[in-house]
Image: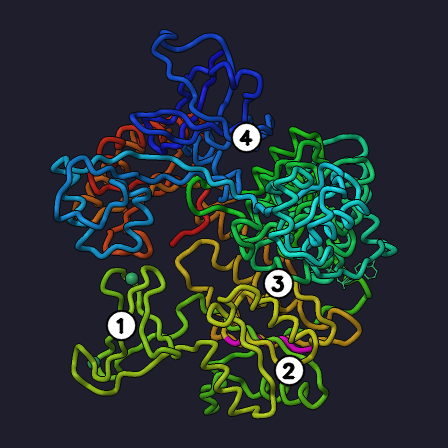
Amino acid sequence: MIASVIVDVAARQTDRMFDYLVPNELADTIVPGVRVHVPFANRNVQGFVMKLHNEPQIAIEKLKPISDQLDLTPPVTEELLLLSEAIKEETLSYHISVLKAMLPAAMRASYDKELYLEEEDPELTGLFVDGVIASWNEFTKQAPENDIQLITRHIRKGTIRVSPIVTTKDARKKQLQVTYVQEPDLTQFSQAKKQLLLSEYLLTCEIGTSFTLKGLAEEANVTTAVINQLVDKGVLKKDYATVGRDPYAGRTFKSSVPMALTEEQQESIRPIEEAFQTNKHETFLLHGVTGSGKTEIYLQSIEQVLDKGKEAIVLVPEISLTPQMVTRFKSRFGSRVAVLHSALSKGEKYDEWRKIREGKVDVVVGARSAVFAPFTNLGIIIIDEEHEMSYKQEEAPRYHARDVAIKRASYYNCPVILGSATPSLESFARAKKGVYTLLSMQERVNQTAMPPVHVIDMREELQNGNRSMFSTSVLEAMQDRLAKKEQMVLLLNRRGYSTFIMCRDCGYVAECPHCDISLTYHRNDQSLQCHYCGHRETIPTVCPSCQSDSIRFFGTGTQKVEQELAKELPDARVIRMDVDTTRRKGSHEKLLQSFEKGEADILLGTQMIAKGLDFPNITLVGVLAADSMLHLPDFRSAERSFQLLTQVAGRAGRHDKQGEVFVQTYTPDHYSVQDVKTHNFLSFYEKEMKMRQLAGYPPYYFLAVVHVSHADLNKAVEVTTNIASYLRRSLSDSAKIYGPSASPIPRIKDRYRYQCMIKYKIEPNLHHVLQELIESYQKEIMKTDLQLHVDTNPYMML
Ligand SMILES: Nc1ncnc2c1ncn2[C@@H]1O[C@H](COP(=O)(O)OP(=O)(O)OP(=O)(O)O)[C@@H](O)[C@H]1O
Ligand SMILES: [Zn+2]
Ligand SMILES: [Zn+2]
C-alpha cells in the first residue's frame, strides 16, 4: 500500500503530495488524516497522510517507507482534508501551512539536530557528553556565542557530524499512577506491618481502581516505598495516565435557563430554526443593535442543535472572549463547552481540542482558529461581531474565518449566523442582495432607549481656553456619576501611537532607525520603543537635530489620561486597561471582575474595553479622541471608526438605568460621527457605500495585494515594477493595477516595503496569474533576500 503525504517543508517545490510505502506493521492502522514521520531529503520530517492507494508516481522500489505513525485517530477529519485543499487554492498558501493551521500548536513537529564528535579535539573538551550533543536547539539556548562559533567551525571542517532529527512531543499531560490489579494474599505479609496495612486497604477497593501515588499513600497511611513493594509483588501496577487540564477547573458557573424571547427575538430565531430543522445551509446576517439580545438567540439556537445530537461552533473576537462571554455559554451548557483562546497555554489548548475530537463536548467557543474545530456532525456555526478584523488571519494561510465557516456549514447542510450591531459593509451588501438572509433587531431587550450621544467639538473647547483632554461637559458628567455612584467607561483609542516625542523648536520627531515610524514613549521604564521591531532607546534630553532642550512628549496615552484623572477627579477610583496592564495571564479577567464588583468608578482603556461588556451600572461612556482612527491610510478607516464608536456607546445604559455618551472630536461633522449620534447604521451604510463606489473599493470591487520587501530599496522597486507590468499584461482591461507604490509603512526592520494593488470585478484567471507570479520568483526568494507574498483578501492596509 502507498500513502500520499504532504510534508512539513513550506516551499513551492515541495508543495505537492509525495508517495511513501506503508510498512506492513502500519497497514492496519494508517488512515488519511494521520500525522507521520517520513524521510525527506536526508532527514525526517512530519507529514500528513492525504490518501492511500496502489498507484505509485514512481517505481515502487524507489519509494521509501514511512518511519513512524503519530496518531491512531486522525486529527484531520475527512471533511477538514477536503477543506484544506479549498483554502490552499483560495489563499494561495502551501498546503502544509493550511493543515498546520487547523491543529493546535502543541501537535506541530519540532525540528532539532544531534551533533556527533567524529574526531577528538582538545578545543572541544567538555562540550560533548559521550561524544554527542543531543539537542542543538537546547545547546544554542544556553551556550556562549564563542562555543557556538567554535562548533560551527568544526562542522565545516568535518570533525563534527550533524544529524537532523524530528520530534513530536506528546503534548498530553501524563501522571504516574498505580492500578490495583490482583488481590493480595494477606498471609504473605504477616511480618510486614505496613504492607499488610496497605493490602487491607486495597481489599476494600475494586480490582482495576487507579490511584495517584500520593493519593494512595495518604489514603492507606503508608509511604511510597511500601507502595513500590506491592508493585514488585504484582498487586499493584504502575503506569502513566493521561490527565486533562481544565482551565476552568474549580470554577462553578451558575446555571442559566432559556429566557422567554421578545417578539423581535422570536421573529429572528424562527428562520434559523427552520433552516436547521430542514437541514438547509443558509447564512443569516443578524443585525441587532447593542443590547438587543443577540447572545440569547445564539444560545437558544444551539440548544436545538444539541437536542438533535449535533454540534455547534461559536466564534468571538479574541478581544471580547471575556470571562463574561465564556460564562454565558458555560452557564447554559456546562461541561459540554470547550473554550479555545490565546490566553490558554499550548497544553491547555491541546486538551480542549482533544475534548472536541474525542466527542466529549459538543460546543466550542473560541477565537478565529476555532473555526477548524474537528467536529464531525456540525449543526450550526455562529460568528459574533462578524465585522471584526481579527477574523482574517494576517499570516499564511491568510484565510477569513467567515469564508471558512460558510464552507463548512455548506458541507454539513447547516445554518451560519453572522451577528453584529455594526455589520461589515461586505456582509450587509450581501444581505441586501439576498445572498445572506437579513434578520434585524432594532430595539433593546427591555425597551430602554438607546443612550443619547453628545458630540463635542474639541476645537471650540480650545478656543474657549480649555487645553485639558476633557471637555467641560464630560468633566461635569463624570462628577455627576461619581456623586451618584454610577460607573463610567472612558475610551482612548490610539493603537500604539499613544505618545511620541517632538522638538518644539525644529519639529524633530524621534523615529525608529529601522522602521519608518515614530517611537512610542514608555513611562514606566523611561524609554522610547518601536512597536514594530522592538527597538528601544533612552529618552534624549536635548534635541538630536538642533540641540534645543524643548523636546517634549506629545499625544495622549492611557497613562497620561490616568494622571489627568487623578488631578481632576482625585476621589475617583480608576482601572486602566491597555497592553501594559493586561500583559500577565489572567490580568484582563481580574481587572474586569474588579470593575464588575464595583471596586472602581472608571474603566479607562483602549479598544479592548469597547466590546461585549454587559454591566448594569455603566451609565456614562466617554470617547476622548474619536478621530484617532479616521485618518489612518486605510479605505476601511471610516467603517472601523463607526463600528468602534457604536460598540463603545453600546456599553451605556443597557439595563434599567438610562445611559449617556460623549464623543470628543476635532471632526464633528464627519458622517461616521454624525451617524453614531443618531444610532443610524443604515444611513452610515448608504454614505459609505457611495464612497466605496466612487473610489472603487470593496464591496464594489475585489482587491488583491502583492507585497514585496527587500533590504535593498532599488531591488524592491525593481521587482514591484516588473510585477505591475506583468499583471497589466496578464489580466483583463477591466482590472485596475495600482503600483508599484511604497507601502503605508515604507520600511520595517530595515526592509523596504513595496506593493501592487489589483482592483477587479470578474477575473477568472486571477488565481492562476498570481500563482505563476509566485512561481517565477521562487528561485530569487530562495536564494536572495527577496520576500514576496500575495493577499487575496487584504484587511491590514498598513
Ligand atoms: N428575552 C430576554 N428577556 C430578558 N432579558 C434578556 C432577553 N434576551 C437578552 N436579555 C438580556 O439583555 C442583555 C443584553 O443582551 P446581549 O448582551 O445578548 O445583547 P447583544 O445584542 O449581544 O449586545 P452587544 O452587541 O452589545 O453585545 C443581557 O443582559 C441579556 O441577558
Ligand atoms: Zn522599529
Ligand atoms: Zn530640535
Q: Amino acid at mark 4?
A: Asp
Which residue lies under the disc numbered 2? 601
Q: Which mark is residue 71?
A: 4
Relative depth, front residue between 125 and 265: 125
- Ligand 1 quadrant? bottom right
C-alpha separation, residue under disc 4 versus residue under disc 2 = 53 Å
Q: Residue 195 placed where, x, y %?
A: 69, 50
Mark 3 or mark 4, which has the lower sequence index?
A: 4
Residue type (three-letter) at the residue carrying disc 2? Asp
Contact between marks 4 and 2 (CB within 8 A): the answer is no
Q: Which residue is mark 3?
A: 611
Quarter of the rendering occupied by the C terminus = bottom left
Asked if 194 appears above or below 171 in the picture, the reply is below
Give the distance between the C-alpha atoms of the residues marked 3 and 4, in whole angstroms: 40 Å
Indicate if the residue with disc 3 has its beta carbon within 8 Å of ligand 1.
yes
* The residue at label 2 has a CB less than 8 Å from ligand 1: no
Q: Are marks 4 and 1 in contact (CB under 8 Å)?
A: no
* SS assignment at label 2: loop
**Residue that appears at 67% across and 48% down:** 338
Closer to the observer: label 4 or label 2? 4
Place of residue 331 in the rendered image (x, y in percent of width and height, measured from the top left): 77, 56
User: Mark 4 or mark 1: which is in front?
Assistant: 4
Task: Identify the magenta region.
Answer: 619-624
x, y percent for residue 439: 73, 47
Is ligand 1 within 8 Å of the beta carbon of the residue shown at mark 4?
no
Query: Is 65 inside the magenta-drawn segment?
Result: no
Q: Which one is in front, 175 or 648?
A: 175
Q: Nearer the viewer, residue 339 or 415?
A: 339
**What kind of residue is marked 3?**
Lys
Q: Amino acid at mark 1?
A: Glu
Please state which of residues 394 and 466 is positioned toward the viewer in this rendering: 394
Q: Residue at x 81, y 52 (%)?
A: 265
